[in-house]
Amino acid sequence: MNHLRLDTNMETVNQAFRIALGDLYGNISLFQDGLLKEPVPVILAGLEYDTPWTRDAAINVWNGASLLFPEESRNTLLSVLTGQEGQVKIGGQYWDAIIWAAGAWQYYVTCGDREFLSLARQAVVNSLYWFEEREYDSGRQLFSGAACYGDGISAYGDEFSDSNQGESGIDHWPAANPDKCDSQKGGVGIPMYTLSTNCLYFLAYQLADDMARELGEKEDPHFSHMRRLLLEGINRNLWLPEEGTFAYYCSLLSGEHICRSQEALGLAFSLLCGVADESQRRQILAHCETTPAGIPCVWPPFARYTEPDGNAFGRHSGTVWPHAQGFWADAAKKSGAYPAFWKEFFSLTRHAVRDQQFGEIYHPLTGQLYGGRQELSGPITEWHSCNRQTWSATAYLRMVFEDLCGMEFSPEGIHFAPLLGTELNHLTLAGLTWRNARITLELSGSGCQVETFTVNGVPQKQPFLPARTSGDVSIRITLI
């Protein structure tokens, strides 16, 4: 376990970081499922959850839990795998289960666990072929299914909610509408094709090949072929050239319908996973809409959840979810859109310090904890915002580790591309254990260009720390 201390020239940031560490640590508990043979420590989804969820598990490890709690991260990833029919595959809600690949790769590049990597590649390859056979539409060149994290019906338009029989989950929709699903291939076949989920499949095919190369195995030419098909499908079906952004989803109900709403996770993944080209990247960043409390999960909100005064929003449409903030902030920083990064970072900092926790969801206008409105076995009602949500806390850690500190992990080591600003212009991260090294990192200055980079007082040509590094390491970076 790391015993971290973050010292910056902004006390609110120091406090928010400690709160994030506390929320993450407080959600580690004994658990057994999946490939775990006995109860071991895993990372639960939040204070009000008693299990990991596949997408939560992957996101938390991807966000930095693997750097702080490597053993618990490994256990958590194993807990959501299955051994069906003699093959290891990814379990959980099927549509975005493939996000597990990103968490598994992050765990490997952070920890160097080659035994786990071999198992992970099996799980990813088996799952890709499994879902491809059952959920891939070769005509549209897209995978069907709901959006990443969008398990609630409030994430979708009226064409889905009207026939969901008052249930809150999109997973109820196929059973209520079997005649509208394309389940001939043995899959679920929800007739929608979402941006975030297809970006994750695009990434997973790439990571499967990355895993093969790292293990000294042959890459699968089918995976590069599928990446090309997916990229064509996403652009043909979801890119809106006149609006300079990607659509949220297309559905096949009542003819082919394009939902032109802005999906925060989908746009973030389009940037982080390499789906958007440079021209698209610039347009997406220029046209993205945000609210006073941060980027909303879906915008504009679906009208059935709003009230005449405009102060009500859907649980999964219009509200601000910190895990989406974290990915959008990271995508903005890595795209050079620094004002967009700072807005999300300082917004989440304020909310955490005010509430002394990282909540699940926030009201987009007031910034208060707010669960949003959604159907619940019948009528639409206001829901609760869960407390100490793990992926909200790790979203903040992602902003600190990957964006402020600029740590980008690879099998070779850590590349540093940090960012400081006029308000936050000094940062020291002490007590960080990484593989066989104990790191103290000190940043000073304002900007994103590395002027000097020293390791134990010795200037280096590149801002890079090799994976073979061991012992006490003092890194100093000045920025301009």
Image: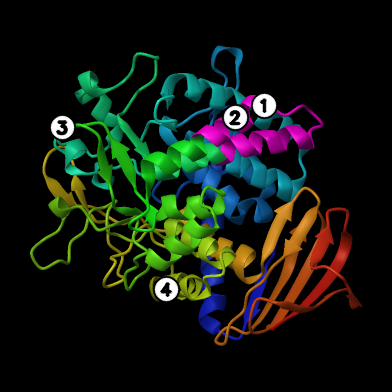
Q: CA distance from mark 1 to mark 4?
A: 44 Å
Query: Does the magenta portion include 125?
Result: no
In depth, the one of 89 and 276 nearer the eye is 276
Picture coordinates of residue 278, whole percent (x, y): 55, 58
Q: Is disc 2 in contact with disc 3, using a CB cutoff of under 8 Å? A: no
In depth, the one of 194 and 405 nearer the eye is 194
Which structural element holds mark 3? Answer: loop
Residue at image mark 1: 221
Q: Earlier in the sequence, mark 4 or mark 2?
A: 2
Residue under the point 21% across and 44% down:
157
Q: Amino acid at mark 4?
A: Ser
In depth, the one of 379 and 159 nearer the eye is 159
Which-is-in-front pick, marks 2 and 3? 2
Q: How many marks?
A: 4
Label at residue 385: none
Residue under the point 42% across and 50% down:
266
Q: Amino acid at mark 2?
A: His
**Which residues are drawn in magenta?**
203-229
Q: Earlier in the sequence, mark 2 or mark 3?
A: 3
Which structural element holds mark 2? Answer: helix
Residue under the point 83% across and 68% down:
462
* One can see residue 76 in this view: no
Residue at image mark 3: 163
- Residue 422 higher or lower than 356, as above or below: below
Residue under the point 44% across and 30% down:
141
Q: Quadrant of residue 146?
A: top left
Residue at image mark 4: 347
Label at residue 225: 2
